[in-house]
Image: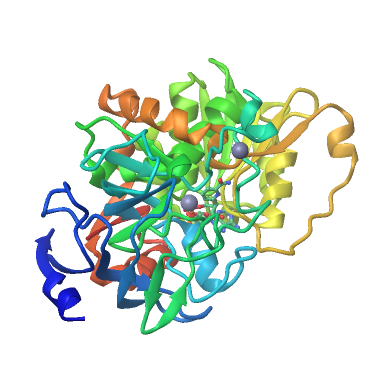
Amino acid sequence: MAEEEAAQQHFHAAGATVTLQGHHAPGKSSASCWGMVIRCRAAVAWATGKPLSLEEVEVAPPKAGEVRIKIVATGICRTDDHILEGSFPDVDFPVIPGHEGAGIVESLGEGVTSVKPGEKVILVSLPHCGECSFCLNPESNYCLKSHLSEPQNLLPDKTSRFTCKGKQIHHFLWVSTFSEYTVIPEYAVAKIDAAAPLDKVCLLGCGFSTGYGAAINAAKVKPGSTCAIFGLGGVGLSVVIGCKVAGASRIIAIDINKDKFAKAKELGATDCLNPRDFKKPIQEVVTEMTGHGVDYSFEAIGLADTMIAALASCNMNTGVCVMVGLADSGSLISIDPMLLLSGRTWKGTLLGGWKMRDCIPKLVSSYLEKKFNSDLLITHTLPITKVNEGFELLRAGKSIRTVLLF
Ligand code: PAD
Ligand code: ZN
Ligand code: ZN
């Protein structure tokens, strides 16, 4: 006990005091927390429907095949709000949410070779085990270790690395980026260029990559084509960026919050529509505007009605509709089968279809080469202590992306 106390130390990181407990591994730098429990700040969701609570948590060292990461910045995505509402499937409480994060490798479990302490990384909520049949399929980005197949509320050995006030806290999609330190399997870590600004590229961990990839990979938008995007949050506006980069000639941006239109236009939208300004259904408006409907439509809201409207907005023959928004778990859609019989394609995408671990480093390089400007999505930057304010801004429709800093 006395020895353990003697091994306790404090150091200052990004303005925060982090307490370490345990012993230094022989040969490791004394500045590292190798093999020790770290006490740090995290935003914990104790139950659904409650605000997050900022707590001191203990983060155990990584086990074999795991990496402990110091989170530097994390975005707030609507999916995190779905957890708080209890509408995201199969989440166990208490939980540390957050899945749009970037950070620095702090220490490694046994056998980890692909990253080193000090390297910059983005945490990927869609892992890549590299062994399952989907990982081995070059066309697929869905790994059978992903949450929808096997809940990622605990690490693969079915234990958590987080405790708070003597209670076990669950991981979210393994990443839990609302904690100053987090532990995840090596195959959910993407190493990125050391020049990347973490407070900006964190968005590539979810929202940006999802929307951009929905246009580039899922729809495969062609130059000169027409597109309609339902929902102009961080995800929908990233679809707008993707359509623009792909060379679409007409990009119709649709939202019930007209305050989103200026940003949509800045990013490449040619037309902005508020369904509440029209008497007829918005799919009829889009069809009339374009002759027979758009070539590609996207739903980035998560509502059954707008999913059907998006489907009916693309042309009945070669139109492709991509579903991106996350509907409440258990909700159902009913459509007229004639919508599909004449040839329309209706599909969904997780994380924009990217094999995240391989593709994130390339997307970061494209960001650094200024192929796209995802910084324009960041409307607010707040300290983690103001995490609930970040959620309020999102719910009030006042932010696109808030980046939280530790
Ligand atoms: P957001 O809340 O920032 O944006 C949603 C937008 O939709 C807002 O601008 C709303 O005003 C608008 N909206 C709401 N209702 C309507 C309506 N009836 N008609 C038109 N517009 C409307 O969310 P976000 O951009 O962070 O995320 C969007 C969805 O995508 C959300 O459901 C999220 O959970 C999901 C998502 N999916 C993936 C994936 O891998 N498929 C990844 C990340 C996020
Ligand atoms: Zn796999
Ligand atoms: Zn997300």
Q: Is residue 15 in view? A: no
Indicate whether 213 appears above or below 19. above
Quadrant of the image containing the C terminus: bottom left
Q: Kindly identify the residue that appears in the image at 51 percent across and 56 percent down.
A: 173
Picture coordinates of residue 139, whole percent (x, y): 64, 25
Indicate whether 85 appears above or below 283. below
Residue closer to the observer: 32 or 127: 32
Q: Residue furthest top?
A: 223
Q: Residue furthest bottom?
A: 165
Q: Is residue 26 in view? A: yes
Indicate whether 141 appears above or below 226. below
Q: Kindly identify the residue that appears in the image at 21 percent across and 81 percent down.
A: 1
Indicate whether 190 appears above or below 359. below
Q: Kindly identify the residue that appears in the image at 16 percent across and 75 percent down.
A: 3
Picture coordinates of residue 258, whole percent (x, y): 44, 53
Query: Toward which corner of the image does residue 135 lie, by quadrant?
Result: top right
Residue closer to the observer: 214 or 385: 385
Give the colour scheme shown.
Answer: rainbow
Picture coordinates of residue 116, whole percent (x, y): 27, 38
Picture coordinates of residue 296, whole percent (x, y): 64, 30
Query: Toward which corner of the image does residue 334 lie, by quadrant?
Result: bottom right
Residue closer to the observer: 109 or 180: 109
Q: Kindly identify the residue that appears in the image at 54 percent across and 30 percent down.
A: 215
Please count the marks in the image. Answer: 0
Relative side of 148 to 199, left or right = right
